[in-house]
Amino acid sequence: MSELHPLSPFNDSSSFISRRSMIQSGVGLAVSSLLEQSLLAQSTSLDNLRIVTGFSAGGTSDTLCRRLASKMAPDYAKSAVVDNRTGAGGQIAIQYIKSQPLDGTVVLQSPSSMFTIYPHIYKKLPYDPVADVTPVSLACVFDLVFAVGPMVPLSVKTLQDYLSWSKANPQLANFGSPAAGSTPHFVGMLVGRLAGINYQHVAYRGSQPAMLDLLGGNLAAVSAPIGDVIQHVSTGKVRMLVVSGAKRSRFAPEVPTFNDLGYKDMVYNEYFGIFLPPKAPPDVVARLNAALRIALTSKDVIDGLNTFGLEALSSSPQEFVDVLKRDTLKWEPIVKQVGFSAD
């Protein structure tokens, strides 16, 4: 199966900085926290902070932004708000951030796909994924899940059941994802290959609109962050068939991984990060990074993100740059093998 399921950017343990190396513990955490608090204390709080996201309210991207906004006021800024600028699979928000002030009052929160996958699927982007942003910190990591809704018979309980149903009902075999060219999109496409079917893909402005269509019986399946799906499982209308991580998610331990089902190369994760506009001054980057590290190691933010299947994850700016560079290189052969182009 390996020829159909290329290695994920996260499948090689050396390709991703571990959570332990990002969020320090014990004495290291205490020292780091003191230094970060000292850095913030030396600066006057900004009047306002605006966290821009390219996805709609209610989804995991928006949730992360709101958790951070609540924690970064009043120490980093006296007030903080979330600005949802949806469209073009997150591109509009990135394009917007290019021309914003460099004083740390406007920041971008974005999934990694827009920087690591989009360069390989779009011949021309309205932004330069390297030159038009300043990476500040990773923010969280999460697994993806492939799930079905009321359009699919209740007798379909496993991924194999769904693949068989899809072969018998190719006209209904579709799936939605938060954006064309995103990691969830590619996972859904690869599920289609397992069935030997070219699934019809429906791109949404975030996962929540896709979930609404799934719950309404207008969409057979979704490929999305686990946190966007798991909140609807209790309704009985949504069934999670498989999770994308290397091991079962602690948020849904009953759901098998692709590895559990024998698809050893199907290991995929996604992460969100925080960016400033291009050429942001080093002192502004350092102050924002310090505030993010404090927020992302606070218990209430960690617990709040866990509720949505997100694991808090901070980093230094250089660590974030290194992860983006590494994954951009790793996605290139995957995109070529799948053969998808957004143009």
Image: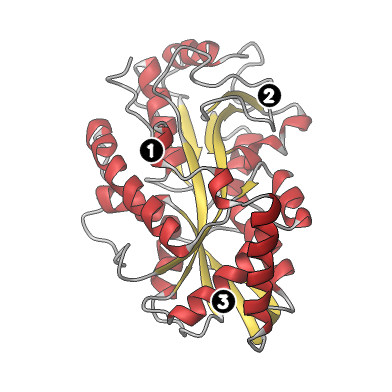
Q: Position of residue 99 (x, y in %)?
A: 40, 81
Distance between the alpha carbons at the discs numbered 1 and 3: 30 Å
Name which residue type carries label 1.
Answer: Pro
Q: Position of residue 117 (x, y in %)?
A: 34, 48
Query: Relative to 321, is 160 on the left or the right?
Result: right
Q: Which residue is mark 3?
A: 287
Name which residue type carries label 3.
Answer: Arg
Mark nearest the camera among 2 and 3 is 3
Q: Residues within 10 Å of mark 1 (few under 14, many from 20)?
A: many
Name which residue type carries label 2.
Answer: Pro
In the picture, the quarter occupied by the N terminus is: top left
Distance between the alpha carbons at the discs numbered 1 and 2: 23 Å
- What residue is shown at x 63% (from left), y 86% (from top)? 43
First in sequence: mark 2 vs mark 3 = 2
Q: Which residue is mark 2?
A: 253
Residue 210 image-quadrant placement: top right
Query: Relative to 201, is 39 on the left or the right?
Result: right
Give the SS element for disc 3: helix
Q: Residues within 10 Å of mark 2 (few under 14, many from 20)?
A: few
Q: Which residue is mark 1?
A: 9
Picture layout, residue 73 above or below residue 89: below
Residue 27 image-quadrant placement: bottom right
* Furthest residue toward front: 27
Query: Relative to 341, is 291 on the left or the right?
Result: right
- What residue is shown at x 67% (from left), y 49% (from top)? 25
Mark nearest the camera among 1 and 3 is 3
Give the SS element for disc 1: loop
First in sequence: mark 1 vs mark 2 = 1
Give the SS element for disc 2: loop
